[in-house]
Amino acid sequence: MLELQPKAQFSVVVPPKLLQEGYLVTFSSDWPSTHEAIREKTFRIDVCNQVPYDLSYILPTGAVGTIYRDVDFSNGGGAFQESIYPENQNSLFEVLLGFKPGNFISHWYVPAGKSVHALEYAQMYPDLTNVKRQYLGARQPKDSPYDDPRIKLYLVKDLAPLIMRLYVLPGVLFEKIVCGLTINKCLMRKIEAPTDDQLLKAKVIRYYDYLRW
Amino acid sequence: MPSSVIIALITAVAIAAERENAVVKAKSMTIDNQGGTTDRIIRIRDVFTTAAATGAVAAAQDEERYLATVIAGDIITLGEEDLKGVKCLGTMNVICNVADGALDRCYVTVGYEHE
């Protein structure tokens, strides 16, 4: 039998979740001068290496907001530091993070003590000691499942500490919180004079302050 | 699905070891007390250590997750529906309230999965 496949009218291309070799990234102008080496510069990703890594914590529940675990992604020997940050200036770590199901929430701070998800009214700030506002800006396991992670972080050398605050919700005595990370290690090569076309195609990586205005 | 057969003892017997990135869920359990001359209470216990946190120090815990009474000479089988929600954060242990004896013996079979 001879069959002639009709020409497809259109096709749907699902873009990859992670940066790939050959991709371009640009760091926006809102990066502070402490990151002068990457600020307003464009890079090509030369090499990628995905490193899976699971973190887990068994936490008790207590009186409202009294017991929580801060997970500090920055490097160091501190009790709560997980040392996920790059050590080289030409490295970019793109991290996908998902949770296994459980009775817990996470709040996000960068740098420590400054929430990423505050609203504009003075009191509308995530607060674990408040039964209502403990859910303000809280990311739950269903928001970023372990098998289909939706939380994405971009880490560069010497970035201010990024803190994930884990809190077990009332109703259970203990909970095991499992965070699945895929750390996409990207080796960057600077493009000295990017063309307009390259700038247009490059993924813009903004400083976290753009989330707070 | 892995499973483990143990003789019920008054000391804890490990069914499934703790895995850092998973919990242990009981999927099936058969308690065979046909060779027993004493009624028995079988317990699933969860042994783990909490992580250090703000407001709490790391501490060893031993929590009860399930309890079943099986009369002498009887055998009971529990399926996934019966054990729904039985989840161990650490090591899954089984413990009994009656000492084992050559003429008074109970076997416990537990099917489980790390999830």
Image (spheres, coloured by chain):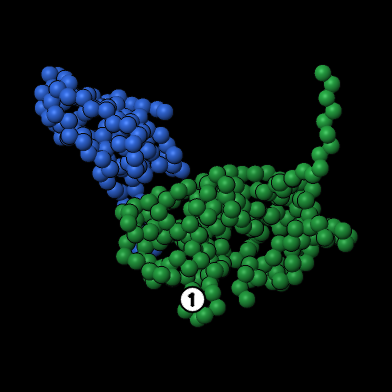
Q: Along the horizontal axis of the image, is A15 left or right of B8? A: right
Q: Along the horizontal axis of the image, is A91 left or right of B102? A: right
Q: Which residue is mark 1?
A: A124
Residue at point 17% right, 24% down?
B74
Q: Chain of mark 1?
A: A
When asked about the image quadrant of residue A168, the answer is bottom left
Circle count = 1
Q: Which chain is blue?
A: B
Quadrant where the image shows the N terminus of chain A:
top right
- Percent position of residue B38, x then y: 10, 27
User: Relative to residue A77, is residue A160 depicted above or below?
Assistant: below
Q: Which residue is situated farthest in the bottom direction here?
A: A122
- Percent position of residue A6, x then y: 83, 34
When asked about the image quadrant of residue B104, the answer is top left
Chain A representation colour: green
Residue at point 82% right, 60% down?
A200
Residue at point 61% right, 57% down?
A153
Q: Amino acid at mark 1?
A: Met
Quadrant where the image shows the C terminus of chain A:
bottom right
Quick one: SS at disc 1? loop
- Percent position of residue B86, x then y: 32, 41
Residue A43 seen anywhere in this rendered image of the structure:
no
Pointer 1: residues within 10 angstroms few (<14), some, or many (20+)? few
- Percent position of residue A196, x then y: 88, 62
Residue at point 64% right, 63% down?
A158
Residue A8 seen anywhere in this rendered image of the structure:
yes
Q: Along the horizontal axis of the image, is A107 left or right of A174? A: right
Q: Which residue is situated farthest in the left direction here?
A: B37
